Amino acid sequence: MSVFLDSELIINDGRIYHLNLKPEDICKDVILVGDPLRVKVIAEKLDEIHFFRKNREFYSCKGSFNNKEILIISSGIGTDNIDIVVNELDALANINFSTRKVCLKKKSLNIYRLGTSGGIQKYDDEIVVSQYSIGLDGLAYYYESEDFLNTQISEKFRSNINWPDAFSLPYCVSCDNDLIKKFSSFKAGITITATGFYAPQGRNLRLNSSIKDLHKKLEKFEFDNLKILNFEMESSAIYFLSKMLGHKPITICSVLSNRNIKTFKKDPKKIIDKMIESSLSIISK
């Protein structure tokens, strides 16, 4: 069995390099949020708090809700940060830090992303669940295996959107089949994971996006009666890495804006709180 070298598995005082956590700090149910301040928002809703920890943009809080242990971690924005977070979570779960070898008995984590997003469809769903995520970032192709990639959806997407050859090849991954059943009260659909907030999502300020009317093209896309519901910047990487490593991922997002009808919610905090409280109740069952 291979031993992971110091340059590959970086451990400081028994803690993984970026997350600054020890293996005993994690638990089966992990909530990921982008905003470090949202860790505190969720923590305030827990029944008990075991610890707070922070390093760079990675804030962590472990506590319990309805007698279930939950670890909350802020990932920061983007799939590059997700590459760090999911790989380090897996290392904490499945690598022995003393021997630097993979544990003989593997652990599977439930990884829930609770995020914010921009809506694509004209109807007004405030909370949605991502049955599939289409990644426009290309991260999946940096890894050797392409297991769990739904090429049927990604190829239809490339064709329908007329995806430029110069851009990263889109990839598509589904959420965990068991977890989505728990969130059946939310509207399910397809989520687009973009590589940025402005031009990659079709926004124009002083610089114009090279893909014209992107959100209008996305609105029309459909696969197996599922439509593209929203834009965000993390889910495809969470789905791909989690499934490759044997974990169970799902994303639940509040929809704060609508790109096609040019609106933004007047009270985003109310919607985010509703998403958090509903999700905590479901996770703790």
Image (cartoon, rainbow, N blue to C red):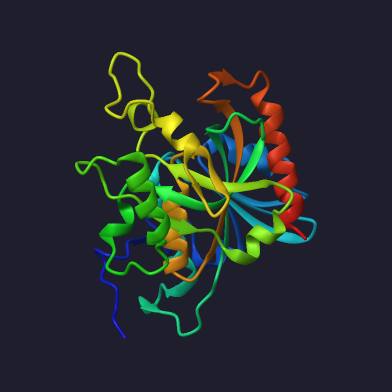
Asked where in the image residue 258 lies, by quadrant, the reply is: top right
Query: 192 or 62: which is nearer to us?
Result: 192
Across and down, in percent, residue 209 comes to 30, 25
Asked where in the image residue 111 lies, by quadrant, the reply is: bottom right
Q: Quadrant of the C terminus?
A: bottom right
Which residue corresponds to the image point at 57% horizontal and 63% vertical from the top-left? 176
Query: Relative to residue 228, is residue 50 drawn left or right?
Result: right
Asked if residue 201 shows in the view, the reply is yes
Query: 134 or 45: which is nearer to us?
Result: 134
Which residue corresponds to the image point at 63% horizontal and 38% vertical from the top-left? 40
Q: Quadrant of the N terminus?
A: bottom left
Residue lying furthest top: 206
Query: Relative to residue 135, is residue 69 drawn left or right?
Result: right
Which residue corresponds to the image point at 73% horizontal and 61% vertical from the top-left? 68
Asked if residue 20 shows in the view, the reply is no
Across and down, in percent, residue 142 comes to 26, 58
Total labels: the figure holds 0
Across and down, in percent, residue 135 comes to 39, 48
Query: 31 or 124: which is nearer to us?
Result: 124
Up-down: is 280 above or below 96?
above
Across and down, in percent, residue 82 comes to 41, 50
Up-down: is 267 above or below 284?
above
Asked where in the image residue 9 lies, by quadrant, the reply is: bottom left
Residue lying furthest left: 166
